[in-house]
Amino acid sequence: MQAFTFNTAASLICGSGSSLKLHEQCAVLGVRRPLFVTDPGLVAIGLVAPVLEALSANGCEPVLFDQVREDPPEATVLAAVEQAVAEDVDGVIAVGGGSSMDVAKVVAVLLKSEQSLADIYGVDQVSGERLPLILVPTTAGTGSEVTPVAVITTGETTKAGVSSRRLLPDVAVLDADLTLGLPPAITAMTGIDAMVHAIEAYTSRHRKNPISDNLARQALGLLGANIRTAVRDGGNREAREKMLLGAMLAGQAFANAPVAAVHALAYPLGGHYHIPHGLSNSLVLPSVLRFNMTAAEALYAELAPIVSGRRGADALVASLEAIIADTGLPATLSAANVPEADLPMLAEEAMLQQRLLVNNPRDVELNDALEIYRAAF
């Protein structure tokens, strides 16, 4: 067995209604005045109001920062830091999707460290400490509540990542009540995203390990068995609980055995056309899996019965294509309004994601990336 390291959040809490007890975790962490990071959409629909009220009713003084948007830019991070400093906060809580949790992770570091945002981009560049951090997802997809990574938009079409164990939270809270009624399209996109995390962790060329493997298999089982129900019936609490748990397990898996070519080819789609991350992954997933067959067929065959109940690597791909179709997501780049003339440019940009491509079970060259995009078109 190869040596490996496995890291995750210090504490995990799973249960309906658990987001209304965040004050208990704040007390343990010594937090009385947390910065509460979320997005305006969740505020508008009233989702976060009960959480804020529960904190306020139990001795906390949450400071609301609700300006996070999808693909958060550096300006959002810096605005959150400025407000937090002005309000003298002593901890950070995020309730939201991956964008809110990513902002919260970085803000928690910048409020405690003397480093600048530019200083911490890259792998293991965080040298300082952070404020206490609690992450509460409202979608079942990114797994950001248990990953040591945050992705920030740095330009019109460019992003940069911060990867450090210091971004792992003190507490991750899974409350399926926060995901009830999530729109079908978002449920589908985030669910596919989580399935990609599990698949790519299981086949990662680097840092693949027995713990991540077991988590990936468990995640795929939960996600594959419940995604259609969750999309069809947004109020099904049991399906929502299993999706949320599956997404978290997949997050733990890829946090320790990193993702690869699906994500590398998805990032340019998000950067140029503002396609949601989960949908970007879904659009290239079948084509990447087929490209990888010569190197990963045996591993895909191991996963196939978990998702499809059938044997053979081809069954895995077919089952994922069926899930994409059944959940109403566009199945091709053309259906997502990606111009065919842009495919060479996308391939060139995908090749810049070498930190991800090195994990792919099969080497990806520029012509390979272009052919994958063409197959997905």
Image (cartoon, rainbow, N blue to C red):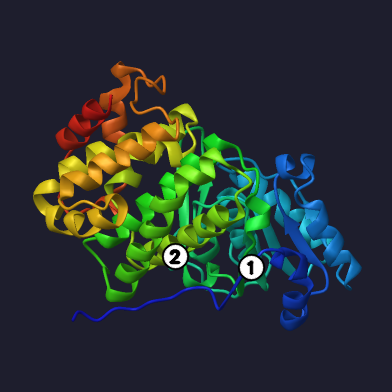
User: Label for residue 365?
Assistant: none
User: Label for residue 15?
Assistant: 1
Q: How many marks?
A: 2
Examine the rendered structure and indicate whether residue 361 appears above or below residue 292.
below
Q: Which residue is labeled 2 in the image? A: 249
Q: What whole-number distance in Å separates the C-alpha atoms at marks 2 and 1? A: 15 Å
Q: Residue at x 41, y 23 (%)?
A: 336
The reply to whether residue 110 is visible in this rendering is yes
Q: Quadrant of residue 340?
A: top left
Q: Amino acid at mark 2?
A: Leu
Q: Amino acid at mark 1?
A: Gly
Q: Position of residue 246 (x, y in %)?
A: 46, 60
Mark 2–mark 1 CB contact (< 8 Å): no
Q: Position of residue 138 (x, y in %)?
A: 62, 52
Examine the rendered structure and indicate whether residue 286 appears above or below residue 202.
above
Examine the rendered structure and indicate whether residue 84 appears above or below residue 212.
above
Q: Secondary structure at mark 2?
A: helix
The foreground one among 234 and 72 is 234
Counting residues from the start of the chain, the first of labels 2 and 1 encountered is 1
Q: Residue at x 44, y 29 (%)?
A: 272
Q: Position of residue 271 (x, y in %)?
A: 45, 34
The reply to whether residue 351 is visible in this rendering is no
133 relative position to 272: left or right: right
Q: Quadrant of residue 107?
A: bottom right
Quarter of the image with the C terminus in it: top left
The foreground one among 169 and 301 is 301
Q: Position of residue 196 (x, y in %)?
A: 36, 50
